[in-house]
Image (cartoon, grey):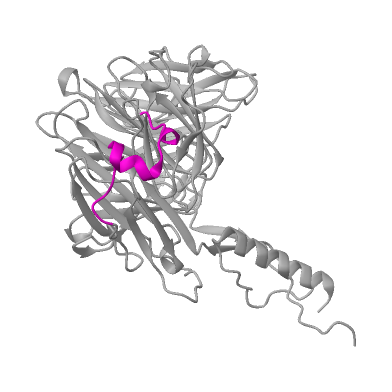
Amino acid sequence: MNRTTLSLLAAATSLAAVTGFAALTAPDGAAETEATAPARLPVERSSLLCPAPATSDIADTVYTSITPQSGSAASSSGSSTAELRPSVATLRGPADDAGKAGEEKEGEAEKEGSAKKPPSHKPVVSLKQPGKPVGAKASGSAAPALVGTATGRLAPGWTTQQTTTVSAGNGRGVLGVNCTAPDTDLWFPGASLAKDRQDYVHLTNPDDTGALVDIELYGKDGALKSQLNDGIQVPAGASVPVLLSTLTTDPAEDVTVHVTTRTGRVGASVRGAGEETGSDWLPASADPSGTLVLPGIPADATAVRLVAFAPGDDDAELKVRLASATGTISPAGAESLRVKSGMTASLDMKDVTKGEAGSLLLSPAEGAPASPVVAALQVTRGKGDKQEIAYIPATAPVTERATAADNRAKGSVLSLTAPGETAQVKVTASAGTEGGAQAVKTYTVKGGTTIAVSPPVPAGLKGSYALTVEPQSGGPVHAARTLLLPEDGIQMFTVQTLPDDRGLVAVPAAEQDLSILGD
């Protein structure tokens, strides 16, 4: 084998080993003299982190977990597993749960009452086979954050949703969140430091070594001053909830939270809670971009508020459009938004959907450069003491597949948006966690529109089930799923966007040459 061939094989093998995600498999009939295009191979390992669900003793939480069935199985010499276990501890800092864990020694945490340890480390969720979801339940305020890993054929597309219902109190509402992969750089536009809000950012460390995290807060005039946001320690396998109001004295109404790690990586989500508006989880926005899509605004939204932040050096002049069932329009009075560099801007869009479900499209204004921004929506249903909020962050398109894990026989609404060309999308409803038969339906989404449909329901459904979205042809598709769970006249709901599940990874193909070096 010549030295060039050895180098290519070593490089490709090293890539698969370093990422820990893909098996390197040479395609049949590969050319012996030319390198082929990168192969799309199933990941072999996935990590998910779920935040501690609630602080209320009357909270009820449902976990639904699934790995979708796939036409291409991951190659694995070992067994396949997918489990979520309680984190080592939920650490609370000295200043009203500020999360300044670095000021406490781990060995003294329980003695000082600053650690809330889970009762056991048995798996809360344990998945057995692709295509068959599993469910689990937890109650009260003691439910911990969860940390988990999937391997082998259970890794590609592994998805878990955490849905919590709190029927009363300041934190009441339906709080839904897709458990997330760990990261090092996350943006959360749409949080608040208003007097009637208690917003926390939950940090969970999946690794065997500690993580060091910085939290930056940005309001309408720029960075908010703080002396407590640098160097927050998140011990190995632990979770830290940080109350945002302990990081600054500025009562800013619209805030962008920036979470970065100096060492290690964390999963992060923001829990927003208001005295009158209820509560829900705010996931991270898609990466900064000049063009963003925020899919899945409910038809009966009574108020919609857009919050955006420009992390670059240039201001962003944004054109705001609404993609509804009939086409794309510029909302009257909310056609544009200017976002100054390093500052958070907001736009009150009121009941912009006017009874017709839609999605928000952000792009550079005519003649303006494509300055990168991050963005999210705060959406309200109901009015007065019956109102309820949910969040919709900007989300990337579904390039190959995405899944909403927790759906019920009633109350699920699937939104599909094609901001460019018309697209065809296949939607698969899995079997239920306790029984039922898979169902499949294909939808056509016209370019520049959003469709909101009652998705297929498995025949004989028992328990909850998963919806998997797979684009078949046409332009890019963005997706979101709304779960409606009204209670006592309150329009409780939650919205989960569906970014691609990254179940496949590109691995450069190695040159296939097994000849002996020299004759």
- Identity of the residue drawn at 26% across and 51% down: 63
- The quarter of the rendered structure image containing the N terminus is bottom right
Left or right: residue 314 versus residue 221 is right
Q: How many marks on residues?
A: 0
Residue 92 rendering spot, x and y as whole percentages: 33, 35
Residue occupying the far right of the picture: 519
The quadrant in which residue 496 appears is top left
> Of residues 111 and 198, which is closer to you in this image?
111
Left or right: residue 154 versus residue 262 is left
> Of residues 13 and 499, which is closer to you in this image?
13
User: Compared with residue 151, is residue 250 higher up or lower down, i.e. above or below?
Assistant: above
Residue 385 rendering spot, x and y as whole percentages: 16, 20
The quadrant in which residue 297 appears is top left
- Identity of the residue drawn at 25% across and 37% down: 54
User: Compared with residue 416, is residue 10 higher up or lower down, i.e. above or below?
Assistant: below
User: Compared with residue 278, is residue 113 higher up or lower down, i.e. above or below?
Assistant: below
**Which stretch appears magenta?**
98-120
Residue 118 lies in the magenta stretch:
yes
- The quarter of the rendered structure image containing the C terminus is bottom right
Residue 415 in sight in this render: no
Residue 139 lies in the magenta stretch:
no
> Of residues 104 and 499, which is closer to you in this image?
104
Residue 438 in sight in this render: yes
Residue 433 rendering spot, x and y as whole percentages: 22, 60
Residue 354 rendering spot, x and y as whole percentages: 30, 22
